[in-house]
Image: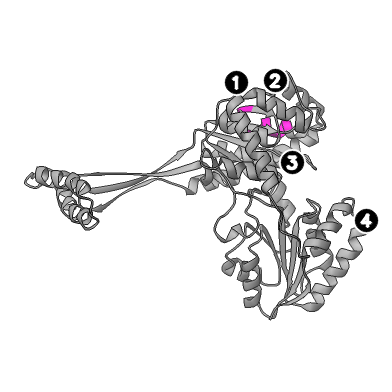
Amino acid sequence: MALYLKTARELPEQDLRAVSDVVKEVLDRVRREGEEAVRFYSKKFDRWDPPSFKVSEAEVEQAVKSLSPLEKEDIDFCQAQIRHFAEKQREAITGFEVETLPGIHLGQKIIPVAASGAYIPGGRYPMLASAHMTVITPKVAGVGRVVACTPPTGGQGVHPATLYAIQAAGADEIYCLGGVQALAALAYGMEGLEPVDMIVGAGNVYVAEAKRQLFGRVGIDLLAGPTEILVLIDETADPFIVAADILGQAEHDPHARQALVSLSRKAAEQVMAEIDAQLPTLPTREIAAVAWRDNGEVIVVDSPEEALTVCDAWAPEHLEVQTADWRYYLDNLTNYGSLFLGEETTVAYGDKAIGTNHVLPTMGAARYTGGLYVGKFLKVVTYQYATRQASAKLGAVCERAANYENMPAHGITCKVRVDKYGKDRRS
């Protein structure tokens, strides 16, 4: 039976009605008034009122010049890894055609969406890696037009490294625009900005609510909450490294969630002691300490089977496995956004450069969905055609099936083909 050495605080349920009302107001006004409303909210929320929200080539060039060769080289390296893995994913998604019965041909085609919007957050930290994930991925999928939006930094425009990353990733249009007003502009359009078909990317609670309200008018990737990490360990794990990995995610947000699941009580206690030892010198301890205090859990389990149960119930965004036999968990775990196997990998690798996408499900959504990947931008559509003889044979069955459902007009569409092709010997 699982033993909790530390439990997350029971926090009051968040009342999101005020957030929902603000988001609805912004979306409605942008839908009605276009850029005038976008500009109003940009000034109100971001103190940003440029002559044009669209980033010019001159601004991109200036950002590129401001970066050191090493900074650009590192960004290029990270993007190469994300692009390569996305290309392999795209290769694995294929169309096909099959003859299921004599004369009945069914097929599957893969068609990319026409236009996608990438929201790159820039609140507490410049999230330039989000550009890799939300711009490169649709471009590899074959999306013809990718529009990137990212908020201004301190009222001074786009962070230079973020702007370079967006440009290098291949965005067709770049807008210095943040928050709900950015998502509204992507969905409804404004002067010079045509609406997109999908909006992807993480953001704060207002951005998540905007995506929820816009879903249906546009497609979305997923509704993400605060970031999460679960680390599964046994007695072979290095407590120092495990503690560092937990705190690495805790620095994201005071609401970030962390869990340690251990097959050894001693190992769990050693990690807890290491977290206490590392926190005082952590540069972002003001955030990480709150996240660990309020949202950290430590769970001791009796067996690998119980570990599976606990981990799958948690369904974390990021799941690290630092055990002697991590392949057992690779083979048997089912609910996670991305899996990091062995001490040699860490969530930060996935966040920045290893190649997998870091836009992942949170708050238990890993029970029913994976994260962002090229397939999110691809429509899997079907087609069918038949010979006349096959149509006559299938039509007789489909007419009866339609009549079973009391849909005679459907049945007639089948019968007219049976009557026309039934005596036809041509194929």
- Which amino acid type is shown beneath numbered disc 4? Thr
Q: Residue 325 lies in what quarter of the image?
A: bottom right
Report the magenta residues as a range.
163-173
Residue 192 numbered tag = 1
Residue at the image point whose x is 30% and y is 48% from the top: 106
- Residue at the (66%, 57%) spot, across then down: 317
> Is disc 3 in contact with disc 1, using a CB cutoff of under 8 Å?
no
Residue type of the residue flagged with mark 3: Met
Q: Is residue 412 above or below residue 145?
A: below
Alpha carbon distance from label 3 to label 2:
23 Å
Question: Pointers 1 and 4 in contact (CB under 8 A)?
Answer: no
Which of the two residues, 249 or 45, is positioned nearer the viewer here?
45
Image location (x, y in percent) of residue 225: 68, 52
**Is residue 202 in sight in this rendering?**
no
Q: Nearer the viewer, residue 70 or 313?
A: 313
Q: Which residue is mark 4?
A: 281
Name the residue tied to disc 2. 52
Along the line of sight, the residue nearer the viewer: 12 or 287: 12
Q: Nearer the viewer, residue 199 or 107?
A: 199
Q: Which tag is nearer the camera, tag 1 or tag 4?
A: 1
